[in-house]
Image (tube, helix red, strand yellow):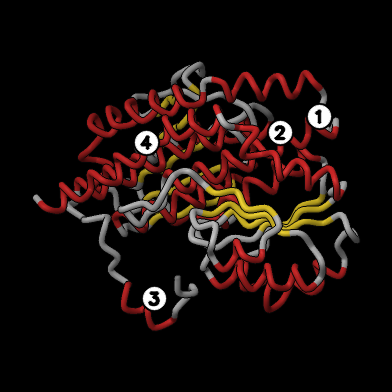
Amino acid sequence: MSQIHNNVHMINEIKQQTELFRHILARRKQYTKEFVELFQTKQVQEIIFIGSGSPSHVSQTLKYAAISVLNVRATAPLPSLFVHHEGKSIIDHSCPGKTILICPVESGRTKGPVFAAQMAKAANIPIVCTTLDEHSSLAKLADVVIKKPSGEEIAPPSTKGHSTGLLLLLLCFLDAARATGRLQPVQLDAYEQAIADLPDRVANTTQYVQSWFSEHRDDVVKAPNYWFLAYGSNVGTATEAVLKFIESHQKPTFAYELEEFLHGPLCAVKKNDIVFFLATEEGPEKQRMLELYDAMKPDYPYCTLVHPQGDTGRDTWDLPIDAGNMPFFDALDYLIPVQVLSYEIADALGIDVTVWTTTAIRQKLKPGFER
Protein backbone atom coordinates (compact mmCIF):
# COMPACT_ATOMS: atom_id res chain seq x y z
CA MET A 1 0.00 0.00 0.00
CA SER A 2 2.86 2.40 0.75
CA GLN A 3 4.11 2.07 -2.83
CA ILE A 4 0.74 2.95 -4.29
CA HIS A 5 0.45 5.90 -1.88
CA ASN A 6 3.92 7.20 -2.83
CA ASN A 7 3.23 6.84 -6.55
CA VAL A 8 0.35 9.28 -6.25
CA HIS A 9 2.98 12.02 -6.02
CA MET A 10 4.07 11.43 -9.62
CA ILE A 11 0.60 11.53 -11.17
CA ASN A 12 -0.27 14.58 -9.08
CA GLU A 13 2.83 16.35 -10.39
CA ILE A 14 1.86 15.45 -13.94
CA LYS A 15 -1.60 16.90 -13.40
CA GLN A 16 -0.13 20.09 -11.92
CA GLN A 17 1.20 20.98 -15.36
CA THR A 18 -2.17 22.35 -16.42
CA GLU A 19 -2.09 25.12 -13.80
CA LEU A 20 1.65 25.64 -14.17
CA PHE A 21 1.19 26.31 -17.88
CA ARG A 22 -1.64 28.76 -17.11
CA HIS A 23 0.62 30.50 -14.60
CA ILE A 24 3.46 30.84 -17.11
CA LEU A 25 1.24 32.08 -19.93
CA ALA A 26 -0.34 34.69 -17.64
CA ARG A 27 3.13 36.00 -16.70
CA ARG A 28 4.81 35.39 -20.03
CA LYS A 29 6.53 38.79 -20.41
CA GLN A 30 8.07 38.50 -16.95
CA TYR A 31 9.68 35.21 -17.92
CA THR A 32 10.85 36.18 -21.41
CA LYS A 33 11.86 39.84 -20.98
CA GLU A 34 15.56 39.40 -20.14
CA PHE A 35 16.08 36.76 -22.81
CA VAL A 36 14.53 38.97 -25.49
CA GLU A 37 16.71 41.91 -24.42
CA LEU A 38 19.87 39.77 -24.57
CA PHE A 39 18.86 38.33 -27.94
CA GLN A 40 18.29 41.80 -29.40
CA THR A 41 21.42 43.32 -27.90
CA LYS A 42 23.70 40.54 -29.12
CA GLN A 43 21.92 40.12 -32.47
CA VAL A 44 22.28 36.40 -31.87
CA GLN A 45 23.17 34.19 -34.82
CA GLU A 46 24.14 30.98 -33.01
CA ILE A 47 22.93 29.06 -29.95
CA ILE A 48 24.65 26.19 -28.15
CA PHE A 49 22.33 24.03 -26.00
CA ILE A 50 23.77 21.99 -23.14
CA GLY A 51 21.94 19.74 -20.69
CA SER A 52 22.23 16.34 -19.02
CA GLY A 53 19.41 13.78 -18.76
CA SER A 54 16.00 15.32 -19.42
CA PRO A 55 17.57 18.72 -20.23
CA SER A 56 19.56 16.97 -22.96
CA HIS A 57 16.29 15.82 -24.53
CA VAL A 58 14.80 19.31 -24.15
CA SER A 59 17.88 20.59 -25.97
CA GLN A 60 17.18 18.31 -28.95
CA THR A 61 13.74 19.84 -29.37
CA LEU A 62 14.93 23.39 -28.71
CA LYS A 63 17.70 23.08 -31.28
CA TYR A 64 15.24 22.61 -34.13
CA ALA A 65 12.93 25.26 -32.71
CA ALA A 66 15.78 27.78 -32.64
CA ILE A 67 16.77 27.00 -36.22
CA SER A 68 13.19 27.42 -37.46
CA VAL A 69 11.77 30.17 -35.24
CA LEU A 70 14.90 32.29 -34.71
CA ASN A 71 16.75 31.54 -37.96
CA VAL A 72 20.02 30.81 -36.14
CA ARG A 73 22.64 28.11 -36.23
CA ALA A 74 22.17 25.69 -33.34
CA THR A 75 23.93 22.69 -31.82
CA ALA A 76 23.08 20.46 -28.85
CA PRO A 77 26.11 18.33 -27.92
CA LEU A 78 26.17 16.18 -24.80
CA PRO A 79 27.86 18.04 -21.93
CA SER A 80 30.78 15.66 -21.37
CA LEU A 81 31.50 15.46 -25.11
CA PHE A 82 31.36 19.25 -25.30
CA VAL A 83 33.71 19.68 -22.34
CA HIS A 84 36.26 17.03 -23.32
CA HIS A 85 36.03 16.80 -27.13
CA GLU A 86 33.89 19.30 -29.02
CA GLY A 87 33.67 22.48 -26.99
CA LYS A 88 36.87 24.22 -28.02
CA SER A 89 36.18 23.66 -31.71
CA ILE A 90 32.54 24.77 -31.40
CA ILE A 91 33.53 27.91 -29.52
CA ASP A 92 36.44 28.72 -31.85
CA HIS A 93 34.15 28.46 -34.89
CA SER A 94 31.16 30.23 -33.35
CA CYS A 95 29.84 33.60 -34.53
CA PRO A 96 32.03 36.20 -32.75
CA GLY A 97 29.95 38.21 -30.28
CA LYS A 98 26.69 36.73 -31.58
CA THR A 99 26.65 33.32 -29.86
CA ILE A 100 24.90 32.36 -26.63
CA LEU A 101 24.86 29.20 -24.50
CA ILE A 102 21.49 27.96 -23.20
CA CYS A 103 21.33 25.39 -20.40
CA PRO A 104 17.73 24.22 -19.81
CA VAL A 105 18.51 22.54 -16.48
CA GLU A 106 16.79 21.44 -13.28
CA SER A 107 18.95 21.80 -10.16
CA GLY A 108 21.76 23.78 -11.78
CA ARG A 109 24.30 21.60 -9.96
CA THR A 110 25.01 18.92 -12.58
CA LYS A 111 28.70 19.13 -13.40
CA GLY A 112 28.60 18.84 -17.21
CA PRO A 113 26.53 21.99 -17.88
CA VAL A 114 28.46 23.89 -15.20
CA PHE A 115 31.81 23.00 -16.83
CA ALA A 116 30.39 23.96 -20.24
CA ALA A 117 29.21 27.29 -18.84
CA GLN A 118 32.69 27.93 -17.43
CA MET A 119 34.13 27.39 -20.90
CA ALA A 120 31.57 29.75 -22.40
CA LYS A 121 32.27 32.35 -19.73
CA ALA A 122 35.98 32.22 -20.50
CA ALA A 123 35.16 32.86 -24.17
CA ASN A 124 32.83 35.80 -23.33
CA ILE A 125 29.78 33.88 -24.53
CA PRO A 126 26.61 34.93 -22.61
CA ILE A 127 24.82 32.16 -20.71
CA VAL A 128 21.09 31.62 -20.29
CA CYS A 129 19.63 28.97 -17.99
CA THR A 130 16.31 27.76 -16.71
CA THR A 131 16.60 26.30 -13.24
CA LEU A 132 14.75 25.54 -10.03
CA ASP A 133 17.52 27.15 -7.98
CA GLU A 134 18.53 30.71 -8.85
CA HIS A 135 21.50 30.40 -6.45
CA SER A 136 22.89 27.20 -7.99
CA SER A 137 26.42 26.77 -9.36
CA LEU A 138 25.14 27.26 -12.91
CA ALA A 139 22.89 30.21 -12.10
CA LYS A 140 25.86 32.07 -10.60
CA LEU A 141 27.60 31.87 -14.00
CA ALA A 142 24.55 32.84 -16.07
CA ASP A 143 23.72 36.24 -17.54
CA VAL A 144 20.00 35.41 -17.71
CA VAL A 145 18.42 33.10 -15.13
CA ILE A 146 14.81 32.01 -15.66
CA LYS A 147 13.52 30.40 -12.48
CA LYS A 148 11.03 27.64 -13.21
CA PRO A 149 7.85 27.83 -11.13
CA SER A 150 7.41 24.05 -11.01
CA GLY A 151 9.27 23.49 -7.72
CA GLU A 152 11.08 20.37 -6.54
CA GLU A 153 9.45 17.06 -7.48
CA ILE A 154 8.89 14.30 -4.95
CA ALA A 155 9.03 11.62 -7.65
CA PRO A 156 12.56 11.70 -9.18
CA PRO A 157 11.38 11.14 -12.80
CA SER A 158 11.07 14.80 -13.84
CA THR A 159 7.70 15.64 -15.39
CA LYS A 160 6.46 19.12 -14.56
CA GLY A 161 10.02 20.47 -14.31
CA HIS A 162 10.87 19.13 -17.74
CA SER A 163 7.75 20.52 -19.40
CA THR A 164 7.86 23.95 -17.80
CA GLY A 165 11.49 24.41 -18.87
CA LEU A 166 10.59 23.56 -22.46
CA LEU A 167 7.57 25.88 -22.47
CA LEU A 168 9.52 28.80 -21.00
CA LEU A 169 12.25 28.67 -23.62
CA LEU A 170 9.85 28.17 -26.51
CA LEU A 171 8.01 31.30 -25.37
CA CYS A 172 11.36 33.12 -25.18
CA PHE A 173 12.02 32.14 -28.78
CA LEU A 174 8.62 33.34 -29.97
CA ASP A 175 8.92 36.66 -28.18
CA ALA A 176 12.46 37.16 -29.49
CA ALA A 177 11.29 36.33 -33.02
CA ARG A 178 8.49 38.89 -32.72
CA ALA A 179 10.83 41.56 -31.35
CA THR A 180 13.41 41.06 -34.10
CA GLY A 181 11.08 40.36 -37.02
CA ARG A 182 12.53 36.89 -37.60
CA LEU A 183 9.07 35.38 -38.11
CA GLN A 184 6.22 36.68 -40.23
CA PRO A 185 3.09 37.83 -38.33
CA VAL A 186 0.99 35.03 -39.85
CA GLN A 187 3.43 32.44 -38.50
CA LEU A 188 3.50 34.05 -35.07
CA ASP A 189 -0.30 34.13 -34.99
CA ALA A 190 -0.46 30.41 -35.74
CA TYR A 191 1.83 29.67 -32.82
CA GLU A 192 -0.17 31.92 -30.52
CA GLN A 193 -3.37 30.08 -31.38
CA ALA A 194 -1.70 26.76 -30.53
CA ILE A 195 -0.46 28.10 -27.20
CA ALA A 196 -3.77 29.57 -26.08
CA ASP A 197 -5.48 26.30 -25.16
CA LEU A 198 -2.34 24.33 -24.23
CA PRO A 199 -3.33 24.01 -20.53
CA ASP A 200 -6.74 22.57 -21.45
CA ARG A 201 -5.12 20.13 -23.89
CA VAL A 202 -2.79 18.88 -21.15
CA ALA A 203 -5.71 18.20 -18.83
CA ASN A 204 -7.73 16.46 -21.56
CA THR A 205 -4.83 14.26 -22.66
CA THR A 206 -3.90 13.27 -19.12
CA GLN A 207 -7.42 12.01 -18.49
CA TYR A 208 -7.69 10.26 -21.85
CA VAL A 209 -4.35 8.43 -21.55
CA GLN A 210 -5.38 7.10 -18.14
CA SER A 211 -8.57 5.74 -19.70
CA TRP A 212 -6.59 4.24 -22.60
CA PHE A 213 -4.24 2.52 -20.17
CA SER A 214 -7.15 1.07 -18.18
CA GLU A 215 -8.50 -0.49 -21.37
CA HIS A 216 -5.15 -1.97 -22.47
CA ARG A 217 -3.57 -2.44 -19.04
CA ASP A 218 -2.77 -6.15 -19.08
CA ASP A 219 -1.11 -6.18 -22.50
CA VAL A 220 0.83 -3.00 -21.85
CA VAL A 221 2.19 -4.18 -18.52
CA LYS A 222 3.13 -7.64 -19.87
CA ALA A 223 5.00 -6.28 -22.87
CA PRO A 224 8.68 -7.37 -22.85
CA ASN A 225 9.90 -4.09 -24.45
CA TYR A 226 8.67 -0.63 -25.40
CA TRP A 227 9.68 1.35 -28.49
CA PHE A 228 9.17 5.02 -29.36
CA LEU A 229 9.53 6.12 -32.98
CA ALA A 230 9.56 9.81 -33.86
CA TYR A 231 10.73 12.44 -36.33
CA GLY A 232 11.87 16.06 -36.24
CA SER A 233 11.73 17.89 -32.94
CA ASN A 234 9.84 15.03 -31.30
CA VAL A 235 12.91 12.80 -31.47
CA GLY A 236 13.67 14.62 -28.20
CA THR A 237 10.25 13.50 -26.92
CA ALA A 238 11.06 9.89 -27.80
CA THR A 239 14.43 9.96 -26.03
CA GLU A 240 12.72 11.53 -23.01
CA ALA A 241 10.21 8.67 -23.12
CA VAL A 242 13.04 6.17 -22.73
CA LEU A 243 14.37 8.00 -19.68
CA LYS A 244 10.93 8.33 -18.09
CA PHE A 245 10.06 4.66 -18.69
CA ILE A 246 13.39 3.37 -17.39
CA GLU A 247 13.37 5.66 -14.35
CA SER A 248 9.80 4.68 -13.50
CA HIS A 249 9.47 0.94 -14.14
CA GLN A 250 12.95 -0.15 -15.34
CA LYS A 251 11.68 -2.23 -18.27
CA PRO A 252 13.66 -2.14 -21.56
CA THR A 253 12.66 0.87 -23.65
CA PHE A 254 14.14 2.20 -26.88
CA ALA A 255 13.81 5.35 -29.00
CA TYR A 256 14.70 5.89 -32.64
CA GLU A 257 14.26 8.48 -35.30
CA LEU A 258 11.90 7.09 -37.92
CA GLU A 259 14.40 6.35 -40.69
CA GLU A 260 17.16 5.16 -38.34
CA PHE A 261 14.77 2.55 -36.95
CA LEU A 262 14.70 0.88 -40.37
CA HIS A 263 18.49 0.44 -40.39
CA GLY A 264 18.71 -2.49 -37.96
CA PRO A 265 16.60 -1.89 -34.83
CA LEU A 266 13.44 -3.14 -36.57
CA CYS A 267 14.80 -6.69 -36.50
CA ALA A 268 14.84 -6.67 -32.67
CA VAL A 269 11.13 -5.93 -32.21
CA LYS A 270 9.20 -8.80 -30.59
CA LYS A 271 5.60 -9.70 -31.40
CA ASN A 272 4.35 -8.64 -27.96
CA ASP A 273 6.34 -5.39 -27.76
CA ILE A 274 4.47 -2.10 -27.63
CA VAL A 275 5.64 0.19 -30.43
CA PHE A 276 4.54 3.82 -30.09
CA PHE A 277 4.52 5.81 -33.36
CA LEU A 278 4.53 9.54 -32.61
CA ALA A 279 2.66 10.81 -35.67
CA THR A 280 2.97 14.50 -34.88
CA GLU A 281 3.17 17.50 -37.23
CA GLU A 282 2.10 17.20 -40.85
CA GLY A 283 4.51 16.68 -43.74
CA PRO A 284 6.43 13.98 -45.60
CA GLU A 285 7.84 12.53 -42.38
CA LYS A 286 4.34 11.91 -41.04
CA GLN A 287 3.35 10.14 -44.22
CA ARG A 288 6.46 8.00 -43.92
CA MET A 289 5.55 7.22 -40.30
CA LEU A 290 2.06 6.10 -41.34
CA GLU A 291 3.55 3.89 -44.06
CA LEU A 292 5.80 2.22 -41.48
CA TYR A 293 2.87 1.72 -39.11
CA ASP A 294 0.77 0.12 -41.87
CA ALA A 295 3.66 -2.17 -42.84
CA MET A 296 4.29 -3.34 -39.26
CA LYS A 297 0.77 -3.61 -37.87
CA PRO A 298 -0.14 -7.01 -39.40
CA ASP A 299 2.83 -8.71 -37.73
CA TYR A 300 3.05 -6.60 -34.56
CA PRO A 301 -0.48 -6.23 -33.17
CA TYR A 302 0.49 -3.85 -30.37
CA CYS A 303 1.72 -1.10 -32.67
CA THR A 304 0.18 2.07 -31.24
CA LEU A 305 -0.35 5.19 -33.33
CA VAL A 306 -0.16 8.30 -31.14
CA HIS A 307 -1.80 11.04 -33.21
CA PRO A 308 -3.95 14.17 -33.03
CA GLN A 309 -7.62 13.57 -32.29
CA GLY A 310 -8.62 15.01 -35.64
CA ASP A 311 -6.80 12.29 -37.59
CA THR A 312 -8.69 9.29 -38.94
CA GLY A 313 -8.41 6.34 -36.56
CA ARG A 314 -6.58 3.19 -37.65
CA ASP A 315 -7.07 0.64 -34.88
CA THR A 316 -8.38 0.04 -31.35
CA TRP A 317 -4.81 0.50 -30.11
CA ASP A 318 -4.69 4.07 -31.43
CA LEU A 319 -3.88 6.69 -28.84
CA PRO A 320 -5.44 9.94 -30.15
CA ILE A 321 -4.50 13.00 -28.08
CA ASP A 322 -5.65 16.59 -27.89
CA ALA A 323 -2.74 18.21 -29.76
CA GLY A 324 -2.16 21.70 -31.13
CA ASN A 325 -0.34 20.38 -34.22
CA MET A 326 2.25 23.17 -34.26
CA PRO A 327 5.90 22.19 -34.64
CA PHE A 328 7.96 22.34 -31.43
CA PHE A 329 5.04 23.26 -29.20
CA ASP A 330 3.46 19.90 -30.03
CA ALA A 331 6.34 18.33 -28.09
CA LEU A 332 4.54 19.56 -24.97
CA ASP A 333 1.40 17.71 -26.07
CA TYR A 334 3.22 14.45 -26.80
CA LEU A 335 5.13 14.49 -23.52
CA ILE A 336 1.87 13.91 -21.64
CA PRO A 337 1.23 10.30 -22.77
CA VAL A 338 4.91 9.55 -22.10
CA GLN A 339 4.64 10.83 -18.54
CA VAL A 340 1.28 9.29 -17.73
CA LEU A 341 2.20 5.85 -19.08
CA SER A 342 5.48 5.92 -17.15
CA TYR A 343 3.49 6.40 -13.97
CA GLU A 344 0.72 3.92 -14.81
CA ILE A 345 3.04 1.04 -15.75
CA ALA A 346 5.18 1.52 -12.64
CA ASP A 347 2.11 1.73 -10.44
CA ALA A 348 0.63 -1.43 -11.97
CA LEU A 349 3.90 -3.25 -11.28
CA GLY A 350 3.97 -2.05 -7.67
CA ILE A 351 7.18 -0.06 -8.13
CA ASP A 352 7.71 2.94 -5.85
CA VAL A 353 8.79 5.73 -8.21
CA THR A 354 9.85 7.99 -5.33
CA VAL A 355 12.82 5.75 -4.47
CA TRP A 356 16.10 5.81 -6.42
CA THR A 357 17.71 2.35 -6.51
CA THR A 358 21.10 3.74 -7.61
CA THR A 359 21.64 6.35 -4.90
CA ALA A 360 24.82 4.73 -3.52
CA ILE A 361 26.51 4.66 -6.94
CA ARG A 362 25.55 8.26 -7.67
CA GLN A 363 26.95 9.32 -4.30
CA LYS A 364 30.27 7.67 -5.14
CA LEU A 365 30.56 9.24 -8.60
CA LYS A 366 29.10 12.65 -7.62
CA PRO A 367 27.71 13.80 -11.02
CA GLY A 368 26.59 17.07 -9.43
CA PHE A 369 27.95 19.72 -7.08
CA GLU A 370 26.69 19.93 -3.49
CA ARG A 371 24.04 22.49 -2.64
Dot 1 falls on a residue whose secondary structure is: loop
Q: Report the residue at 43% width, 56% height from top.
A: 243
- Disc 3 to disc 1, how far (Cα)? 44 Å
- Whether residue 217 is visible here, answered yes or no, is yes
Q: Residue 24 carries which label?
A: none
16 or 305, which is in the foreground? 16
Q: Name the residue under label 4.
A: 16
Q: Mark 2 points at which residue?
A: 174
- Whether residue 265 is visible here, answered yes or no, is no
Q: How busy is the neighbourhood of tag 4: few (under 14 within 10 Å), some, or many (20 plus)?
A: some
Q: Going from the N terminus, do you reach mark 3 or mark 4 first?
A: 4
Disc 2 to disc 1: CB gap under 8 Å: yes
- Disc 2 to disc 1, how far (Cα)? 8 Å
Q: Mark 3 points at which residue?
A: 362
Is 98 on the left or on the right of 258, as rendered?
right
Disc 1 to disc 4: CB gap under 8 Å: no
Residue type at tag 3: Arg
157 or 305, which is in the foreground? 157
